[in-house]
Amino acid sequence: MVAPTHRINVALPFSMIQTHEPSKELGELAEIVAGIAAIVQRLAPGTDSETLHQRAQTLAAQLR
C-alpha cells in the first residue's frame, strides 16, 4: 500500500483581481459596429444580418 506523504496548499491571488469600467473608446467602437451592422442589414437583408444587428445593438447598449 502506498500512502501519500506530501501535502500541497494552493493559494489563489484573489486580492489581485481587478475590474475596470469599459472605456469611452470601447463604447464608441461598439456604436460604430452597430451602425455598420445596420447598414449591412439594409444592404443584405436576412436572418444573419438581422441577428448581427441585434447583437451589435445589445452590446452597444450595455457599454453606454
Image (spheres, rainbow, N blue to C red):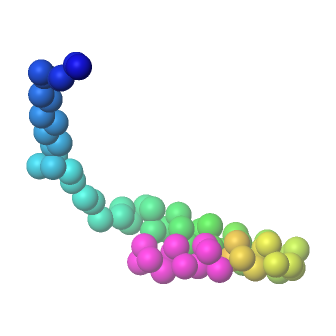
Q: Position of residue 52 (x, y in %)?
A: 70, 72
62 lies left or right of 36: left
Indicate yes or no whether the magenta region holds residue 61: yes
Specify the principal SS of the magenta part.
helix
Identify the residue at image location x=75%, y=79%. 50
Relative to residue 51, is residue 1 depicted above or below?
above
Residue in front for this viewpoint, 12 or 33: 12
Residue in front for this viewpoint, 23 or 14: 14
Q: Position of residue 58 (x, y in %)?
A: 54, 79
Relative to residue 57, is residue 2 depicted above or below?
above
Residue at the far front: name it.
Answer: 1
Residue in front for this viewpoint, 4 or 9: 4
Relative to residue 36, is residue 25 depicted above or below?
above
Rendered image quadrant of residue 19? bottom left
Rendered image quadrant of residue 33? bottom right
Identify the residue at image location x=17%, y=42%. 12
Residue in front for this viewpoint, 10 or 50: 10
Identify the residue at image location x=49%, y=68%. 28
Q: Quadrant of the N terminus?
A: top left
Per the rendered image, the range of residues in magenta is 54-64
6 lies left or right of 49: left
Rendered image quadrant of residue 46? bottom right
38 lies left or right of 47: left
Q: Position of residue 45 (x, y in %)?
A: 87, 79
The answer to whether one can see residue 42 in this image is yes
Identify the residue at image location x=43%, y=61%. 25
Q: Position of residue 63 (x, y in %)?
A: 42, 73
